Structures are given as structure tokens and as C-alpha cells.
């Protein structure tokens, strides 16, 4: 539910409000990779790349410790785009 609300807010350019939705979602499910992805995107759109990097490190750490694996290719792609100074591409819902 929070993901849908956050995506709706993002589509309206309300990145700070969407960020709050994703952060709340991660409080309930610290392994919800899509929430990490959306949070990194929101932070980047707000010019907060350093914080987006921190979110990636948290995601990578959680996945490594709890699941014994790396984040998905999509999460890594988002992270690379942040490192390169680019805003992650918007995900289009159909």
C-alpha cells in the first residue's frame, strides 16, 4: 500500500512525501528491495545523492547479512546512475 501511495506522490513531483512513505515501508520490511530503489530515486530527485548512496549501502548490507546475496541488477543499475551523477530513469507503470 505504501509503495502505491509513494509512486502516486512521485508522479506528482512530491518526492519528499514519497520519501516518507518509502521510509515507513522499510521500517516494516527491511528487505523490500523495491522500497530501497524508490527511496534512492526520490532522494536523487531532491539532489540528495549522498543520502541515496547511504540507502544503497544499507540495502546491500541487509541483503548480505540476512539473505547472503547482493541486491538485484536493477538496484545496482540505480546505484550506478547515482554514482554517475544521473537521475535514475522513471519507472513507467502500465
Image (tube, rainbow, N blue to C red):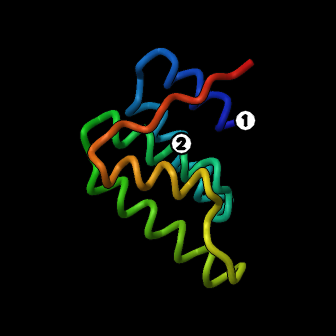
Cα distance, mark 1 to mark 2?
14 Å
Disc 2, SS: helix
Quarter of the image where the N terminus is located: top right
Answer above or below: position of 36 versus 38.
Answer: below
Mark 1 is surrounded, within 10 Å at the Cα level, by few (under 14), some (14 to 19) or many (20 or more) other residues, namely few
Residue displayed at 44% across by 41% down: 41
Residue 48 image position (x, y, % from top left): 26, 46
Q: Earlier in the sequence, mark 1 or mark 2?
A: 1
- Is residue 40 shown left or right of residue 47? right
Between 27 and 71, the one lying in front of the other is: 71
- Is residue 6 shown left or right of residue 39? right
Mark 2 is surrounded, within 10 Å at the Cα level, by few (under 14), some (14 to 19) or many (20 or more) other residues, namely many
Would you identify the image quadrant in which residue 17 lies?
A: top left
Answer above or below: position of 35 versus 15.
Answer: below
Would you identify the image quadrant in which residue 16 lies?
A: top left
Disc 1, SS: loop
Residue 14 image position (x, y, % from top left): 41, 23
Answer above or below: position of 19 versus 29.
Answer: above
- Is residue 12 shown left or right of residue 73? left
Residue displayed at 59% across by 28% down: 7
Identify the residue under disc 1: 1
Identify the residue under disc 2: 38
Q: Looking at the image, is mark 1 or mark 2 nearer the viewer?
A: 2
Amino acid at each position: 500500500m505504501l509503495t502505491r501511495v509513494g509512486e502516486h506522490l512521485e508522479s506528482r513531483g512530491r518526492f519528499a512525501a514519497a520519501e516518507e512513505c518509502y521510509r515507513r515501508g522499510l521500517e516494516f520490511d527491511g528487505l523490500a528491495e523495491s522500497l530501497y530503489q524508490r527511496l534512492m530515486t526520490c532522494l536523487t530527485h531532491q539532489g540528495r545523492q549522498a543520502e541515496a548512496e547511504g540507502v544503497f549501502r544499507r540495502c546491500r548490507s541487509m541483503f548480505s547479512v540476512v539473505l547472503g546475496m547482493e541486491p538485484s541488477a536493477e538496484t545496482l543499475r540505480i546505484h550506478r546512475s547515482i554514482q554517475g551523477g544521473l537521475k535514475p530513469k522513471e519507472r513507467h507503470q502500465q
